[in-house]
Image: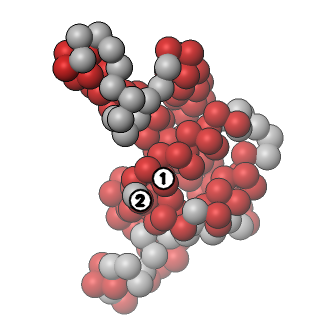
Amino acid sequence: HAESQISSSIVKFCMSTPPHDSNLDNKTFRLFASCEILAAEFQRYRTALCPYSAPPDIFPHRYGSSDQNFQQHHFMSIKEPKGKEGAVCRIEMFRVFKAFAVNHLEDILQQEQKANTICKDLDDGNINKNRPISLNKPEIDALQNCAKLWFESAMTTH
């Protein structure tokens, strides 16, 4: 259930929000606020990429007193970064979010392709309507275009 909630939230967000939207930051923070499971999954994703992006209470053993300055300087919370350093953190966070979103969109497309192949093999070319994902050709095309647009945006974010 959690994975489908994350996937549906990402698809809805990416399909309805252009990746270069001038209000992307606020919309993304609202998305996180409205879907705690998505915010938590994104934080885990960021932590895997940069362990010091994790809040100290998640991995308290990682932050000794000698790491205090490093932690204060590099810590990026899921909340909106503020100030001069916050601007750099904000850009990086949205670049990482775009990659996170694209990865989820690509996973959905791969699941759909795999499900179509299996169902066609089992049903002699007829799509099994009881499978978990059921997208038609225009929906698949739209999702592929969305993933491509978000991917290109992630590559050009600076």
Q: Quadrant of the C terminus?
A: top right
The picture quadrant where one finds residue 29 is: bottom right
Camera sees residue 29 = no
* Mark 1 secondary-structure assignment: helix
Badge 2 density bin: few <14, some 14–19, many ≥20, Cα 10 Å: few
| 66 vs 44: above or below | below
Instruction: Give percent across and percent down for residue 42.
Output: 47, 57
**Along the viewing direction, whichever of 130 and 92 lies nearer the viewer:** 130
Residue position for label 1? 6
Instruction: Give percent across and percent down for residue 30.
Output: 70, 60
| Tally of numbered discs | 2
Q: Residue at x 58, y 62 (%)?
A: 35
Residue position for label 2? 2
Instruction: Give percent across and percent down for residue 120.
Output: 26, 15
**Along the viewing direction, whichever of 44 and 137 lies nearer the viewer:** 137
Is disc 1 in contact with disc 2, using a CB cutoff of under 8 Å?
A: yes
